[in-house]
Amino acid sequence: MIDPRLIRTDSDMLRRAQKARGESVELVDELVAADEDRRRAIAYSETLRAQQKELGREVAKATAETRPGLLAQAKELAEKVKEAEGGTAVIEERFNELMLMLPNPVFEDVPQGGEDDFTVLEIIGAPRNFEAEGFTPRDHLELGEMLGAIDMERGAKVSGSRFYFLTGYGALLEMALTQYAMAQALEWGFFPMIVPSLVRPSAMEGTGFLGQAAQDVYHLPADDLYLVGTSEVALAAYHSDEILDGDALPLKYVGYSPCFRREAGSYGKDTRGIFRVHWFDKVEFFVYCRPEESEAEHQKILEFEKAFISSLGIPYQVLEVASGDLGLSAARKYDCYGWVPSQQKYREITSTSNCTTFQSRRLNTRARYDDGVGPVATLNGTLCAMTRMIIMILENHQNDDGSVNIPGVLRPYLGGLEVFEPIV
RNA sequence: GGCGAGAUCGCAUAGUGGUCUAGUGCAGCCGCCUUGAAAGCGGCCAGGUGUAACAGCCUCCAGGGUUCGAAUCCCUGUCUCGCCGCCA
């Protein structure tokens, strides 16, 4: 949710932001009208309520003679109050519904356009020239099968399409990545958390995942719980309904959890291997900070992501995502796309969003500053999405015989092992 | 899963239909006093909405209900605690 005051004070900015996303401008017009209705209704209800309170005091003090008359009056007024408040409730609900639909206004300097209109900010590392090395690179699934690291067939047998088992080296690699990622984050000053992956509707709503992304979310109707698609949900809701200490900001968390995605509407897309799956594990950054510091914090998260990817020897690009491709909650988003030799393409491995005060308003998280209680900004960013990183490592560090060299930084977490050797 | 008890402005508590505009203690903040500190004394000390600033209004876990009027009575939900059952 954005600051409701903006509806009155800066509706033009909101209209521009809606246009930038390619979303309806009418929503803003509706909101402006709904806000006026709401304010009028509230003022009327308040007046009546004040009258009722006053009359109540008189009833309490009344004598036996004056009491019946006052009671009759009070009864009549109570009717009116009830009616007015009923009306106000309906109007307010309408306003809130509209507010929840309104996305976070995009920063004005975000590149305009849709999915393909991103800006490439940087290209880091160079893809290997396999041709010069004299062999055609295998894709991650073929390598994974040779190494006995990935078992898709049994994943499908047990859980269905887009499920997998990580076996042997695969399981070890994920655990090594997890430990390495956590160790790095700790060194960078983040506070480690293992978070629930089942959450209440309010957590899902507050982080903005029940809007346009709702069809991608698993829901357990018997318990009215949602399976999170990212630990961001739990980390954002962690401080819901709290007033944080402004001096303690920024709060920097790194969370670990499984992530679940229905991937509805992506049938036939990335069906091979573990690139797009219904479940994976992820280490995620989450930062609470002062709104005016959010842009600087966003840059820091991006730098940490880059350092992590670089340390694993993956060639990659840094993109700024265009306005039309931002999620409901993001005002700006940077993605890192790693090189996939078998596809001869860069594919997404990390993503970091500045949600400014969008999530914190919905989740009622604020901070106490020197000049009073005020809003906080939230930011999130991928440190290591396991399946994606496993793909990057297998494909980029493969050898002609199907073996895979283990990046130096991971070796301490694999008992010093330097190469995964094929088992078949 | 069963039974019972509870949820009040940082913490601890009072409050069982109108005087609650929610009291008190502790902690915290400001001032006086003091060489300094403690003690003592005086003041401040929840959030929201709203306003130029006041005022007003809302919030006693949440949502409904009863009533002219609810922190207080009733219903539902959530969470916490205790006991029993089950369990990694």
Image (cartoon, coloured by chain):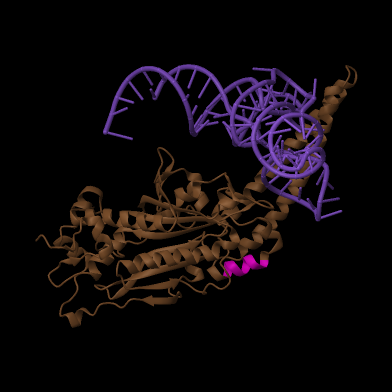
Chain colours: A brown, B purple
| Residue A85, quarter of the rendered image | top right
Q: Is residue A421 left or right of residue B18?
A: left
Query: How many numbered marks are there?
Result: 0
User: Which is more toward the observer, B35 or A345?
Assistant: B35
Q: Which picture quadrant has residue B68?
A: top right
Residue found 30% across the figure and 70% down from its top = A314
Q: At which x and y percent is residue A8?
A: 71, 60
B57 or A300, which lies in front? A300
The image quarter in which residue A18 lies: bottom right
- Evaluate whether residue A95 shows in this view: yes
The residue at 63%/65% (across/down) is A14
Q: Main secondary structure of the magenta part?
A: helix
Q: A50 or A140, which lies in front?
A: A140
Left or right of B4? Residue A283 is left
The quadrant in which the N terminus of chain A is found is bottom right
User: Looking at this rendering, what residue extends furthest in the bottom direction?
Assistant: A132
Magenta residue check for A15:
yes
Q: Position of residue A59 (x, y in %)?
A: 84, 24
Q: Based on the picture, tell me whether residue A390 belongs to the magenta stretch.
A: no
In the image, the segment drawn in magenta is A12-19
Up/down of A241 relative to A7, above or below? above
Image-based side of A411 in relation to A65, left or right: left
Residue at x-position 53% and y-position 65%: A296
Name the outermost residue toward the left.
A424
Which residue occupies 56% across, 52% down? A360
Q: Split into 4 quadrants, where in the image is the C terminus of chain A?
A: bottom left
Q: Is residue A386 above or below residue A73?
A: below
Report x, y in % for residue A339. Answer: 31, 72
The answer, for residue A278, to whether it is visible in the render is: no
Q: In this rendered view, identify the residue nearer to me: A372 or A8.
A: A372
